[in-house]
Amino acid sequence: MQKIIVIGSPGAGKSTFARRLRDISGLPLYYLDMIYHRSDKTAVSREEFDEKLMRILETERWIIDGNYRRTLKLRLEKCTDVFLFDLPADVCLRGAVARVGRAREDMPWTEDGLDPGFRQYILDFPKDQLPEIYELLDKYKGARSLTVFRTRDEADEWLEKHGALPEGKAH
């Protein structure tokens, strides 16, 4: 595992998993939200985002956390491993709500609420995004290692098996 993407719905647990994976692998971790968003809640231009992403993709080792469907095909072409969080929408929504008010290393600001449009995006993710993601993944079947998590416990078990205990759990 040298070039890893972690994808799935917001609130699924991607960033938590990616941090733990970084800690056990030593790979540099890049959050697409940190590349796209500025601390004043504005976004960089498409060109600036693409330029920053290309610089990362040209390096030899990385973990990239985030969905960003527009660039998913490009990241799939460059990666060696994919971790997909395919959790129920209600679980993801609870995850997104739980992080409101918390400072996070994967976002340049602290969310002070859950925007109604973002909430709807999470609820619609299984029907609007997952079919296209699975279609793209099918094109790379066999050429990329794919791990699909349907629960956060599955992700925790994978990490434990590979040398990292979930946060808050002791040996």
Image (cartoon, helix red, strand yellow):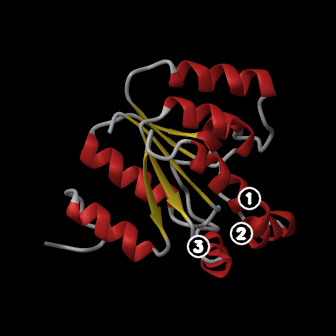
The residue beneath circle 1 is: 129
* Left or right: 140, with 37 as reference point: left
Q: Position of residue 72 (x, y in %)?
A: 65, 40
Residue type at tag 3: Gly
The residue beneath circle 3 is: 95
Quadrant of the snapshot with the C terminus: bottom left
Against 156, is 88 above or below?
below
Q: Residue furthest left?
A: 171
- Residue 129: image quadrant is bottom right
* Left or right: 111, with 8 as reference point: right
User: Looking at this view, is 119 or 127 the one in front?
Assistant: 127
* Residue 149 in view of the camera: yes
Residue displayed at 29% across by 47% down? 23
Quadrant of the snapshot with the N terminus: top left
Against 170, is 20 above or below?
above
* Left or right: 170, with 20 as reference point: left
Mark 2 and mark 1 residues within 8 Å of each other at the beta carbon: yes
Residue displayed at 53% across by 54% down? 104
Helix, strand or loop at disc 3? helix
Q: Position of residue 168 (x, y in %)?
A: 30, 72
Q: CA gap, disc 2 to disc 1?
A: 6 Å
Residue displayed at 63% across by 31% down? 74
Residue type at tag 2: Pro
Against 61, is 14 above or below?
below
Mark 3 and mark 1 residues within 8 Å of each other at the beta carbon: no
The residue beneath circle 2 is: 126
